[in-house]
Amino acid sequence: MSLKIYNTLTGKKEEFVPLKPGKVGMYVCGPTVYDTSHIGHARSVVIFDVIFRWFRASGYDVCYVRNFTDVDDKIINKANETGHDPIYISEKYIKEFHNEMDSLNVLRPTIEPKATEHIQDIINFISKLIENKKAYHVEGGDVFFSISSFEGYGKLSGRNPDDMIAGARIAVDENKKNPMDFTLWKPAKEGEPAWESPWGPGRPGWHIECSAMSNRYLGEGFDIHGGGKDLIFPHHENEIAQSEALSGCQFVKYWVHNGFVDINNEKMSKSLGNFTMIKDVLKRYHPEVIRLFLLSKHYRSPIDYNENSMDEVISSLDKIYGFLDRAQKAGVELLLEPCFDFSEDKSSGTKDGNTLYSGAKSSGNVSGGEDFAIFREAMDDDFNSARGMAAVFDCVRKGNKILDDNSESLQNSETLSSSQKEKLETICSDLKKMGEILGIISHDPAEYFRSKKEEGIAMKGIDPAFVDSLVAERTEARKAKNFARADEIRAQLDEMKIVLEDGPGGTTWKFV
RNA sequence: GGCGGCUUGGCCAAGUGGUAAGGCGACGGCCUGCAAAGCCGUUAUUCUCCGGUUCAAAUCCGGAAGCCGCCUCCA
């Protein structure tokens, strides 16, 4: 039973062996905070959230760093367009990002560093690169990294610098020694945010912040570096160049990249006008529906966001909660306390040294019933949440079967036999554990359905008292064996997209 | 032009050499006054196509077709 991870660097699935026993250092590229986050950001964040949770659940002490790029051309442009200060822009979108990710039940990383708060680290990093002749300062204030000084350039993306130069589509800065050299520090124009540096007032290039901040919190070499597939080149390639050129040791052991979200089978792009923002998706769907959707396909593959898929996921989540609701009503006690401890004691980390770990209590308790074992196997196989979902539904089906098999005794208000109850409790507890890893099933089932109903009432402008009175009338009609009237009422409610369920405890209704 | 990926039932989707998970949907059955929910069963002799390796391939190799991504500071 060992964890395997697909490593972009080697193109293979490899057994995970941490650099330091029991500890995992993980850095994920966060957003550039210049605009509202879209569903693609949500995918990346949710995927790495689940990876973080899985490491934690597997007993590792994880230091999870996710940065905010808060100084950048796009932020400056936005500031100029809106007449606001760049700080105002970045803070506004950081706040939005946090709100949305909190809604999606995403755990906060151990540390969320901002580029602007690590300017000195960045300057020190660049200075050392220059000292070591890996970078050079040119007339005008720019500092470039010299790719020819780093032998391994291209090893992550499998690119050959000469080929890329031949196919380059952008004008080359004539100050560069090599057209592929990239910016480490750029001089400030009038009115732009700037910091004093040995090369004059300016600001950092994009790639350097991740090298400097990961080095600050995770050390010269660490275990996991993640981000979207698009970051493989040039961003992550450049990070490797900067970091390894300086340290001489391997920067990152396992590179993990997630696939994109398409919208109705098209790439999300500004020109197509189909940017799908998280806040809009949250208006339409329950957060757990969104998570379940994002995790329903393997993280490396593209996933298509469309109404049909979302409707399917709604049915799936209802099915899970439907079972839990039945189980609870049959007297099974659902665990309210989390099985895994994802809380962190951030104060006990050693921020002074190179490395900061969470100081979290080990929450390693991946044991459970046979269903959780199947789930664990799937997650250990390159975080295969899609495969893990089969285990979730197996629990639901098995549990429902036990309830069906005992329906007679339950109807006669007898309780379940202890052996049956025990089986159900194991199933429910396995299900709960899977839910905690995936970040779903966090609500009380009755509460889930109640709030769902309330939303339907609000959205459709239906008077619940009116529905209840019709239901009551139908119950009377049924007692009187007036089935014609009963069916008439059912048809009337059907028009309102309301479906009735006659159960042992009376009739309930819900929206289709 | 360079690099990489994908193609599995009506739809979504696992599968990484040993004889096709799971979800949605559909159909049949049980249950129900009738339904709904749930359960049981059926729904791919076959994994884009053509070759090859192997006792054995959706899985490995070669080729073809289609689709897609990166090479533009887009996750």
Image: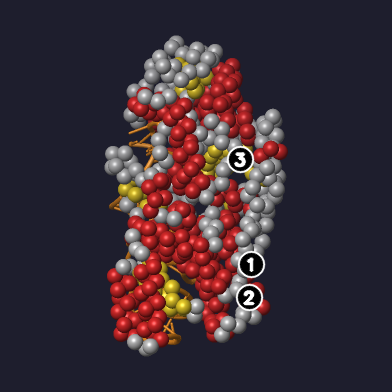
Q: Name the residue under label 2.
A: A421
The image's colouring method is secondary structure
Amino acid beneath label 2:
Lys
Q: Residue at x 51, y 65 (%)?
A: A446
Gap between marks 3 and 2 measured at Cα: 39 Å
Give the SS element for disc 1: loop
Amino acid beneath label 1:
Gly
Circle 2 or circle 1, nearest the eye: 2
Percent from the top left, x then y, of residue A510? 40, 68
Q: Quadrant of residue A217?
A: top right
Q: Name the residue under label 3.
A: A110
Pick the quarter of the image with the C terminus of chain A: bottom left
Subunit bearing disc 2: A
Q: How crowded is mark 2: few (under 14 residues within 10 Å), some or many (20 or more)?
A: some
Percent from the top left, x then y, of residue A422? 65, 74
Percent from the top left, x then y, of residue B25? 35, 70
Q: How crowded is mark 3: few (under 14 residues within 10 Å), some or many (20 or more)?
A: many
